[in-house]
Image (cartoon, rainbow, N blue to C red):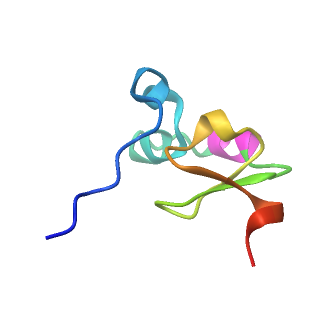
């Protein structure tokens, strides 16, 4: 059985898109994803700052 992906920054996890979605903070999510430069490898969320996702990958590195 494959091990689940872990967050790269457990201390900052409270500010990640996945947590904000769970809290229903759509305005905050919109603000954090208005000009995306990174995507989360785990959930696919696109964000302006890689600090706002669990497994950031630069959009320039994605096919």
Quadrant into which the C terminus falls: bottom right
Residue at 80% x, 52% y: name it.
36
Residue 38: in magenta span:
no
Q: Position of residue 16 (x, y in %)?
A: 52, 37
- Callout count: 0
Q: Is residue 50 left or right of residue 54?
A: right
Give the quarter of the image for residue 48: top right
Q: Judge whether 16 appears above or below 39 on screen.
A: above
Q: Nearer the viewer, residue 48 or 25?
A: 48
Residue at 71% x, 47% y: name it.
30
Residue at 42% x, 20% y: name it.
11
Q: Judge whether 42 appears above or below 13 on screen.
A: below
Q: Nearer the viewer, residue 63 or 19?
A: 63
Q: In the image as oriented, which residue stretches furthest toward the bottom?
A: 63
Residue at 81% x, 51% y: name it.
37
Q: In the image as oriented, which residue stretches furthest toward the top?
A: 11
Chief SS of the magenta region: helix
Q: Judge whether 49 appears above or below 58 on screen.
A: above
First to last magenta residue range: 27-32
Q: Position of residue 60 (x, y in %)?
A: 83, 63
Q: Is residue 29 left or right of residue 43?
A: right
Q: Position of residue 26 (x, y in %)?
A: 59, 46
Q: Position of residue 59 (x, y in %)?
A: 78, 61
């Amino acid at each position: 059985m494959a091990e689940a992906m872990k967050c790269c920054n457990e201390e900052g996890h409270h500010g990640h898109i996945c947590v904000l979605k769970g809290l229903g903070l759509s305005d905050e999510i919109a603000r954090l994803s208005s000009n995306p430069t990174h995507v989360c490898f785990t959930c696919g969320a696109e964000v302006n700052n890689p600090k706002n996702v669990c497994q950031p990958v630069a959009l320039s590195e994605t096919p």
